[in-house]
Amino acid sequence: MSGIPLDQIKIRNELEPGDIGYVIYLHGSLYAKEYGYGRQFETYVAEGLCEFMKRHNPRMDRVWVCEHGGKMIGFLLVMQRGDAAQLRYFLIAPEYRGCGLGSKLMGQFMEFIKERGYRKAFLWTTSELATAARLYTSAGFRLTEEKESTSFGKALRERRYDLLLP
């Protein structure tokens, strides 16, 4: 499916009923299959999304829900953290990777944070997600912190990336 034209993928910025549960499901199932993450990761995603919904500020927070054929195939959100924007839950279904959707979402994320006046952004990921790290660094994010972790049901290295805007 990586040859699918981007204009066939719908991107919306409003959550609909069922979206939060499906994002939790996608993260839990995909990361278990691809990286061996345990239930702890799914719980982490659920807690973070619950926090997002409780603290949601429509002016400073945004979601990007990607759909094809009426099915969610990608997701990204930005959440205000003081004076910084936190990029979270960036996911693209495997059969849609390689079509440019990740770059398109990253571009829309960058436009949004600039429009909203953010001067810095950050995200946490793991050392296993090398393709994602390349996308982040190509947008100007720099690796600033690493730590050993077992928070996702297995031993891994969590990595923090930071971005400073002019």
Image (tube, helix red, strand yellow):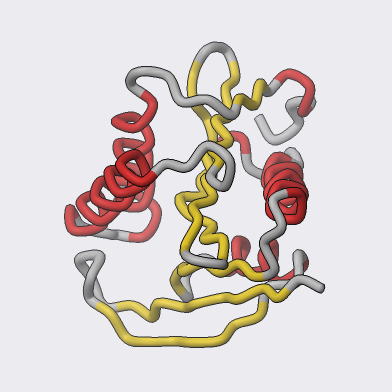
Residue 116 to residue 140: above or below = above
Q: At x 73% / y 18%, what residue is drawn?
A: 8
Residue 87 to residue 129: above or below = above
Q: At x 76% / y 71%, what residue is drawn?
A: 165
Residue 100: where, in percent of width, then height?
Answer: 76, 42
Which one is in front, 98 or 47? 47
The answer to which quarter of the image holds residue 16 is top left
Q: At x 46% / y 68%, what residue is drawn?
A: 125
Which one is in front, 42 or 48? 48
Examine the rendering and report whether any part of residue 93 can be seen: no
Residue 58: where, in percent of width, then height?
Answer: 52, 37
Q: At x 22% / y 76%, what residue is drawn?
A: 150
In the displayed structure image, the side of residue 166 where residue 87 appears, left or right:
left
In the displayed structure image, the side of residue 111 where residue 11 appears, left or right:
left
Quadrant where the C terminus sits is bottom right
Residue 36: where, in percent of width, then height?
Answer: 29, 59
Residue 27 to residue 150: above or below = above
Residue 86: where, in percent of width, then height?
Answer: 52, 61
